[in-house]
Image (tube, grey):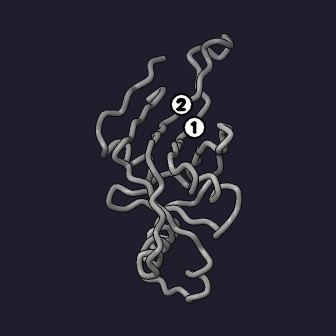
Amino acid sequence: MRVKILKTPIEMTKIIISSKICFVSMVDKNGMPYNLPFNFGYKDNYIYLHSGLEGKKIEILKNNPNVCIAFSNSEELAYQNEHVACSYFMRYKSVLILGKVEFIEDYNEKEKALSIVMRHYTGKEDFTFKAPSVNNVLCFRVSTENMTGKAMGY
């Protein structure tokens, strides 16, 4: 089976918007990797993420904002010959984004970021937020400028 390298942002964007979660990888100050699943939103070539105000991931990201974000969907077991073990493979489509976290501090921009995340999961545009909720969440974004994609079995 050949792996197809995705060449256009449109192909890769389709994978991102059809994904339910993404995995964000980061590296702590001891050089150890740390990877977590995140809910996300996508708009205008940025992935929007949110988190609590403190914790291990926040400490890591403030010290080293470099991340790798992985999206994968359409996973399906396939084979060329059902009786030959080595002919089995996993069909998939995936995208990787390498970038730097940009923290969003402005209250109104945080509301916009949270709305983008909510739209991804609900399809709705119109949300209101309570000030304590917005003030007690950390929002950040990562540019999709450095994006690669692959598909296997398609």
The one nearer the camera, 82 or 102, is: 102
Going 61% across and 65% down the picture, which residue do you hit? 51
- Asked if marks 1 and 2 touch (Cβ < 8 Å), the reply is yes
Mark sitting earlier along the chain (1/2):
1
Q: Secondary structure at mark 1?
A: strand
Task: In the rendered view, tell whether residue 94 sits above or below residue 63.
Answer: above
29 left or right, relative to 105: right
Going 38% across and 41% down the picture, which residue do you hit? 147
Going 46% across and 69% down the picture, which residue do you hit? 104
Q: Residues within 10 Å of mark 1 (few under 14, many from 20)?
A: few
55 left or right, relative to 151: right
Q: Residues within 10 Å of mark 2 (few under 14, many from 20)?
A: some
The one nearer the camera, 60 or 138, is: 60
Which residue matches tag 1? 75
Q: Position of residue 47 (x, y in %)?
A: 44, 57
The one nearer the camera, 89 or 69, is: 69
Numbered mark located on residue 53 in the image? none
Q: Position of residue 107 (x, y in %)?
A: 46, 81
Q: Position of residue 141 (x, y in %)?
A: 45, 60
The one nearer the camera, 78 or 63, is: 63
Quarter holding the C terminus? Answer: top left
Q: Secondary structure at mark 2?
A: strand
Q: Amino acid at mark 2?
A: Arg
Task: In the rendered view, tell whether residue 89 sits above or below residue 108.
Answer: above
Which residue matches tag 2? 91
Q: Amino acid at mark 1?
A: Glu
Q: Is residue 142 visible?
A: yes
Going 57% across and 57% down the picture, which residue do you hit? 62
Cα distance in 3D space between marks 1 and 2: 5 Å
Q: Is residue 71 visible?
A: no
Q: Position of residue 112 (x, y in %)?
A: 42, 75
